[in-house]
Image (cartoon, rainbow, N blue to C red):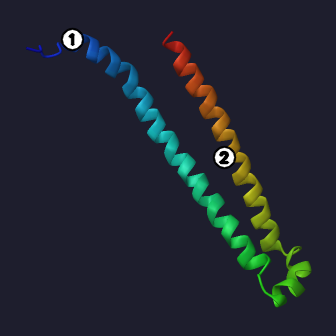
Amino acid sequence: MTEALAIDPHELYHYYSHISPIIVTSMQISKMYMFWIFIHYTIANAYPYFCAPSNFKGFLVSPFLVSSPHCKALRWAFDQSSLTVDNMWIIFGAWAAGKITSFF
């Protein structure tokens, strides 16, 4: 006959008290990450539509559109969103490494 596993409530609470703040912080950070991913995706799809249409007319007007204010703004926003997402991965990696090493 197998015995039921005895789980010590104090030990369970100990693990919960360490993991719960990590989960809450992760959820808060993921909202910011999803916001920047949405911005990046939207701009990446808006630039070809507004600044580099995929037809012959788009080929002809592309040299003029590349200098237009809205295309410059889209390029700037694309670069900034890319940089922000890159930095968020670096921050996440450093944070996760700190959390993992704090258990040892």
Tell me the amino acid under the disc marked 1.
Answer: Asp
Q: Provide residue 24's location: percent of width, then percent of height.
A: 41, 34
Front residue of this view, candidates 57 and 30: 57
On screen, residue 71 versus residue 1, left or right, reads right
Residue 46 picture location, percent across and down: 68, 72
- Determine whether the residue tagged by mark 1 lies in a helix, strand or loop: loop
Task: Count residues near mark 1 (Cα–Cα under 10 Å), then give few for <14, some for 14-19, many for 20+.
Answer: few
Q: Would residue 103 appear left or right of 49 to someone viewing this image? A: left
The quarter of the displayed image where residue 98 is located: top right
Q: Name which residue lies at 55% across and 15% down.
A: 101
Is 89 displayed left or right of 21 in the figure?
right
Quick one: 31 or 5, which is closer to the camera?
Answer: 5
Among the two numbered marks 1 and 2 on one chain, the one whose residue lies closer to the N terminus: 1
**Which of label 1 and label 2 is nearer to you?**
1
Residue at 50% x, 47% y is: 31
Give me the residue at 32% from left, 22% from top. Answer: 16
Query: In the image, is residue 29 above or below residue 20?
Result: below
Q: Quadrant of residue 4?
A: top left
- Estimate the spatial distance between the alpha carbons at disc 1 and disc 2, rounded to whole Å: 41 Å
What's under tag 2, amino acid-wise? Val
Q: How many marks?
A: 2
Label 2 sits on residue = 85
- Which residue sits furthest bottom? 57
Q: What label does residue 8 carry, if any?
A: 1
- The location of residue 63, given as percent across then percent down, is 92, 79
Secondary structure of residue under mark 2: helix
Mark drawn on residue 21: none
Estimate the x, y position of residue 1 in percent, counting from the top left: 7, 14
